[in-house]
Image (cartoon, rainbow, N blue to C red):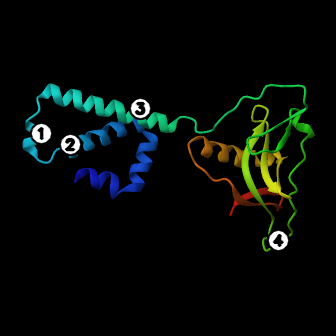
Amino acid sequence: MFKQIIVNQNDAWYKSFSGNYADSFLYFICLLNYFSGFKNIQDYKEKTVEEHRVLLNNLAVANLNDYFTRMHSKLPIEPISPNDNEFYYNQRGAKCFFDYTRQGYLDIPKLKSNKERGAIYQVLSVGFFGGNEQPCVTIYKDEQAQCLLLPKELSDWAFDMVAFSNIGGNFFPSDVEFGYINGRYYAEIL
């Protein structure tokens, strides 16, 4: 019952607290799960104190291990070694130059008012060239994957997208609207 109140009925609190104090909170949830495994107090009393310690500890270790496995990087990273070619193909099949300054830029229209719409592209992935120095997107256009650079002003957006993917978020492929209005670039997942 207590577990249901804490976890199932108060979802926002659970997510907020577990994000800030993950280890302690996961142990607390593990303790609730341990107690909920007993049908009544008599089942609980049948175990010795030592058995309770071992069973709870094993459950806690398994839960923490599962948590950290889930939190580990979800991005499939394949190292690319330089070869005789000046380019390689990324995981989405788009041509990428080792010297990323040879890559083209995504065409982003300048808008005159909020009533206008930006350019909508089918984005397959978001990433960076170099040590997070140049954001890029892989889009599907003209029946092929194309890797294009983004303006540096969209670096924060690109970093957020990569961070979400890294923890298992799967936003792409998605349609994304890009535009430039009032002196600022924007990207919005539709």
Q: Residue at x 67, y 34 (%)?
A: 77
Residue type of the residue flagged with mark 3: Asn
Residue type of the residue flagged with mark 4: Ser
Cα separation between marks 2 and 1: 8 Å
Numbered label attached to residue 35: 2
In x, y percent, where is residue 174? 69, 58
Q: Quadrant where the C terminus lies?
A: bottom right
Please rate how many residues cluster around mark 2, counting C-alpha atoms within 10 Å: few if below 14, some from 14 to 19, many from 20: some
Q: Which residue is mark 1?
A: 44
Q: Residue at x 76, y 39 (%)?
A: 128
Which quarter of the figure has residue 133?
top right
Q: Secondary structure at mark 1?
A: helix
Q: Secondary structure at mark 4?
A: loop
Say whether marks 4 and 2 touch (CB < 8 Å).
no
Q: Secondary structure at mark 2?
A: helix
Which quarter of the figure has residue 62?
top left
User: Mark 3 vs mark 2: which is more N-terminal?
Assistant: 2
In x, y percent, where is residue 134? 81, 39
Numbered label attached to residue 113: 4
Q: Secondary structure at mark 3?
A: helix
Q: Quadrant where the N terminus lies?
A: bottom left
Residue type of the residue flagged with mark 1: Tyr
Cα separation between marks 3 and 2: 20 Å
Please rate how many residues cluster around mark 1, counting C-alpha atoms within 10 Å: few if below 14, some from 14 to 19, many from 20: some
Q: Residue at x 31, y 42 (%)?
A: 29
